[in-house]
Amino acid sequence: MTDGLLIIGSSQAGVSLATSLRALGHDEPITLLGDENHRPYQRPALSKEWLQGGITNEKLMFRTQEYWAEHRIDVVKNERIIRIDKNDDGSGVAHSMSGADFPFDRLALAVGARARRLLLDGVDLPGVLYLRNADDALELKARVPGVREAVVIGGGFIGLEAAASLARMGRSVTLIEAAPRLVPRAVGEQTSAHLLAHHRAAGLDILLGASVRRIVPRGDRVGGVELADGRVISADLVLVGVGVIPNTELAESIGLVCDNGIRVDESALASDGVTVAVGDCANLPNPVPGAPEGDRVRFESVNNAIEQAKVAAYAITGRREEYAGIPWFWSNQGTIKLQIAGLSTGHDRTLVRADPERGKHSVLYYRGDRILAADCVNSPLDFMAVRSALSKGQSIPYEAAGDPSVQLKSVTVDPAALVAAD
């Protein structure tokens, strides 16, 4: 008998690692351990379909109990690991807050990230919420019926998704973003402007370049948000979405190198060469072909969690595979479906493909003649074409892409064709 693999973290990355290992024929024991008192579930729908009542609790679950039993994956709920004793060969024991011990032959960290907290007066008032896990979502959903006015602090994906959901549920919503535009870390200026116009037209009151001074009470609960300029925005509920912080404390305690996440190589191996780290907590070499040498990234996406878990599963079974793929992301915001393919870092020109009558709006990012990425709003065909081209090392000529009536897949070319054209 062996202790097998202990996966700490039962969200998307941890689940994907466990299921990938079984798909590869890995036969040793697997323990999938989570610190929430819920079966493993999907997070993205919490701020959208689930909050609006579009899907049930059961639809959030990754797998049935029968699946876990059939594949001999021991799913452990409600155990928070507070200390790990690890040996030089990678084996050890993880100690839970409850007093339970979990011995392992090998360790995988899929510990994710936590919501970044505001450090302001009033943040502890009832009615000030964050949205990161199921318990957060349950509290938010329970409070919504008593809410007339909501303030969302943060104009990133979570903030926009939740704000759009609350507005569709009939609430008056003000969104406050400190930056001069929406989603500044993930999309370009043209996409930000398109999102801003759409959400304002849909009824969201969006304040850009606005700093929050404090949360204002009304009796013994939240009553509003005071801005740096003295304005007070009335609110029955304040939802904070100002980013996340990777959970690196356990990794640091066992001597793993961390820097904006747990540093791993292309095979998801941490600095000790044995432990694997996957998902939101992992800082990995940029997997995009042609990325600058030494460039590192930390992705917060379902696709990254799945793809990185696959190469980690190979590493655990003794086969080294490198994560070298095209990152892609999505965000559903009311009637908007934003899909992003690739990374726009280093672009030197953009091209907009817009069809206002059909609500389609794509921004393509180029470096010279090579396409790097695309932000696609309600334009799934553009998204799929760019993603496919990037994954095959192809490009889409700038001039040919300018006509929005032209399907991008019909003008995709190999790099050699671009050179010949010159």
Image (spheres, rainbow, N blue to C red):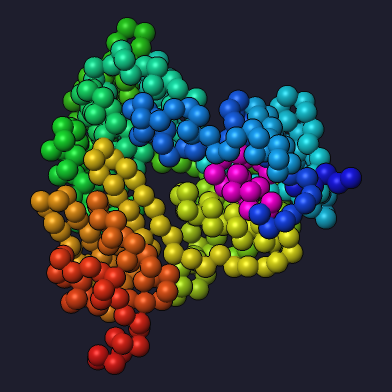
- Locate residue 121 relative to residue 360 in the image: left or right: right
- Magenta-colored segment: predominant secondary structure: helix
Residues rendered magenta in the picture: 7-22
Q: Quick one: which residue is furthest to the top in this view?
A: 219
Query: Which residue does the image show at 31% across and 87% down from the upper left?
Result: 417
Is any atom of residue 73 visible in this view? Answer: no
Quarter of the figure with the N terminus = top right
Query: Which residue does the image show at 25% across and 44% down from the upper left?
Result: 336
Q: Position of residue 34 (x, y in %)?
A: 63, 34
Query: Which residue does the image show at 77% across and 51% down from the upper left?
Result: 27
Q: Position of residue 144 (x, y in %)?
A: 33, 19
Q: Position of residue 323 (x, y in %)?
A: 56, 65
Q: Nearer the viewer, residue 321 or 276?
A: 321
Residue 161 vertical placement versus 230 (above, below): below
Q: Nearer the viewer, residue 245 or 106?
A: 106
- Locate residue 81 relative to residue 225 in the image: left or right: right
What is the quadrant of residue 268 in the picture? bottom right
Is any atom of residue 140 visible in this view? Answer: yes
Quarter of the figure with the C terminus = bottom left
Query: Which residue does the image show at 36% across and 38% down from the upper left?
Result: 158
Residue 272 vertical placement versus 151 (above, below): below
